Image (spheres, rainbow, N blue to C red):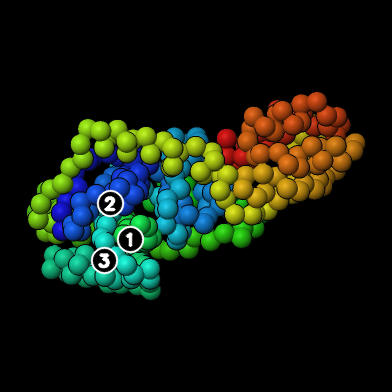
Amino acid sequence: MKYLDFPSNDACVNLAMEYYVTEKALFPGEDICWFWNTVPTVVIGKYQVAQAEANLPYLEENGIALVRRHSGGGAIYSDENNLMFSIITKSTDDGLDFQKFTTPLIDLFNRWGIPATHSGRNDLLLHGKKFSGNAQFHYNGYTVHHGTMLIDTDFDALTRAITPPQEKIVSKGVASVREHVINLKPYLPKDVLDRGLACALRDALTDGVLTFTKEQQREILSIADERFRGWDVLFGKSPKFTVTRTKKFAGGTLTLELEVEHGIIKHAVAFGDFFGDSAPLCAALCGVPATREDLYLALQNIVLPHQIDLDGLVEMLTDVSGR
């Protein structure tokens, strides 16, 4: 297996590398992999609803990135002390075979004296706790396998980042399973810690280095922006979900139950002890993209219920819109 060298701590760039290699059918005949770290980031699966998987206000307050990958599975939190990895092989098999890719890792950890085991379909465990989650997808005759390895991750930030606010969210997408997790750092041999886990894995599992040309690097950075960033990718492609938000205004408490599909509010119902007519508000919300800017435009010229202010109303819906 060859090691692909293009270091970046931007999850969007690394996911764009996966897409680029498979789209362009680069490095024919080679199995390739690379190991990468990220700035604090939540990565959600292809079929997940961001609002149901991540604490969006916490992410915004703490500068944590949000990214949607091309594979299914659940949400993960990654930071500088979590090691991500990507493996790409040529394949005509459309089935999912996680252990084909994780068994070499398990074997290596066991040789290092770390009793790692498989669990279920796509997790790796140490002492019964999860240290690695894995996901897979097929594209253009390739299998792309990627996963995580918790080394010394901040578990408090992890818990806060992938736990959404307590208001009710019902999603028709895939919900993440929050499992007990464990860091590898206390169990890694000293020589592995001294070299760094990424270097130790690269030395043990690969036998050569591949690189991109300058032009290919520019194309990858462009793909990262086009396919992995922005509201349309993160929120506009979400499955249908319903969300309830409640806020106390000067005119009373207002609860809005919204049905959202592909980032568009399809239906709205208002409850509460406020005064005035909520029908214009609910009607104005229907058909509106759930972004801060569009909500302002839709609501600024209607008569809101008594002492329900526009700024407070839009702020109430911030983590519904994602922007």
The crowding category of the residue bearing disc 2, from other C-alpha atoms within 10 Å (few below 14, some 14 to 19, many at least 20), is some
Judge left or right: residue 43 versus residue 183: right
Q: Which quarter of the rendering shows the N terminus?
A: bottom left
Q: Which percent across, then down, holds residue 17?
A: 31, 45
Disc 2 marks which amino acid? Ala
The crowding category of the residue bearing disc 3, from other C-alpha atoms within 10 Å (few below 14, some 14 to 19, many at least 20), is some
Q: Which residue is mark 3?
A: 101
User: In front of the other: label 2 or label 3?
Assistant: 2
Q: Which quarter of the rendering shows the C terminus?
A: top right
Which quadrant would residue 120 be assigned to in this image? bottom left
Disc 3 marks which amino acid? Phe
Name the foreground residue: 125 vs 10: 10
User: In front of the other: label 1 or label 3?
Assistant: 1
For image coordinates 21% across by 40% down, the residue present is: 212
Q: Which residue is mark 2?
A: 25
Q: Which percent across, then down, holds residue 268?
A: 77, 47
Q: Of the residues under marks 2 and 3, which one precedes in the sequence?
A: 2
For image coordinates 59% across by 54% down, the residue present is: 239
Judge left or right: residue 24 versus residue 64: left
Dots 2, 1 in contact, CB < 8 A? yes
Label 1 and label 3: CA atoms lie apart by: 17 Å
